[in-house]
Image (spheres, rainbow, N blue to C red):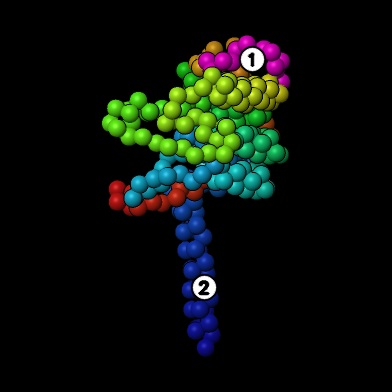
Amino acid sequence: MKTFWKLILTFGVLALFILVLAFVMAALVSGLDMPSIGGGSVAVIPIHGPITMNGCSGGLFGGGYCASVDEIKEELRNADADPTIRAIVLDINSGGGEVVASRELTREVLKTEKPIVAWIGEIGASGAYYIASAADEIVADETSMTGSIGVIMTITHYYDLMESIGVNVTVIKAGKSKDVGSPYRPMTPAENKELTDMTDKVYDSFVRDVAKNRGLNEDYVRSISGGKIYLGVEAKELKLVDTLGGFDDAIDVAAELGDISGEPAIRMPEKKVTWADLLQ
């Protein structure tokens, strides 16, 4: 009987060891490093592709390439609540996106209590720079494309094409502005002014928020804006970027802000497996 219980205990210990080993291996495979003893972790949160409030549209075998506001907000909140994480790096590679989506993420970054470093890779422009401006520090490569503080509205008209192929559209509306920007007819000067005024208001808000986030004078930010894109080295001279460097430099800055002693562990979000991944 004693031998039987010894065997049960031995198998139990072995099973526990296998479970721990499997957890460690899964963490390594997914890019999730274990927290360093006596130190701390830096969470890396990607902001890649167009910034959108909606989910990423994709094809049959996988999701699209975008920065989903809901997913990034959840990652920020999880990192802020995790006691093993001491700082956060936003890995930005985006040319911008929707206005409200960019503002929503900017607000979430500002609400996050832990230090946040924005690292701009290939590009961090327009709405993506909007979000980066809310970080405690911005790191960019000398050749990163950044800035583009501006707003654009595009309206497509194809009434000439429709007329040439004999297609007519009758619009019945209540309210004179109900079909502003209609592709079926030319835009009136009054309608053009209406949409221009709206775009200007969004632009003013963009400039005002960047100036506040970066601790800069609003008139100065307006003078260097206008949608112009700057290389990282130029952006640093203009005070749009704090430090020139690569991803590892951003991690070092985050570790310093998070008061991490020694080499920080890097916490990457778990990669969602798609059908496209399984077919590779």
Q: What's the distance in space between the residues labelled 1 and 2, CA to CA?
A: 67 Å
x 33%, y 50%: residue: 60
Identity of the amino acid at label 1? Arg
Q: Is residue 85 visible?
A: yes
Q: Is residue 243 above or below residue 86?
A: above
Determine which of the numbered discs, if any, sits on residue 222 in the image.
1
Q: Secondary structure at mark 1?
A: helix
Q: Residue at x 64, y 24 (%)?
A: 201
Do callouts 1 and 2 mark residues in contact (Cβ within 8 Å)? no
x and y percent of residue 112 in the render?
A: 68, 39
Residue at the image position 46 percent from the left and 34 percent from the top: 49
The amino acid type, in three-letter code, at marker 2 is Gly
Q: Please state if 208 lies on the left or on the right of 170 as rendered.
A: right
Left or right: residue 233 versus residue 161 is right
Q: Residues within 10 Å of mark 2 (few under 14, many from 20)?
A: few
Mark closest to the chain's N terminus, 1 or 2: 2
Residue 56 in percent (x, y) is at 45, 44
* Magenta residues (range): 215-228
Residue 154 among magenta residues: no
> Relative to 147, is 107 on the left or the right?
right
Circle 2 residue: 12
Q: Nearer the viewer, residue 165 or 269?
A: 165
Secondary structure beneath disc 2? helix
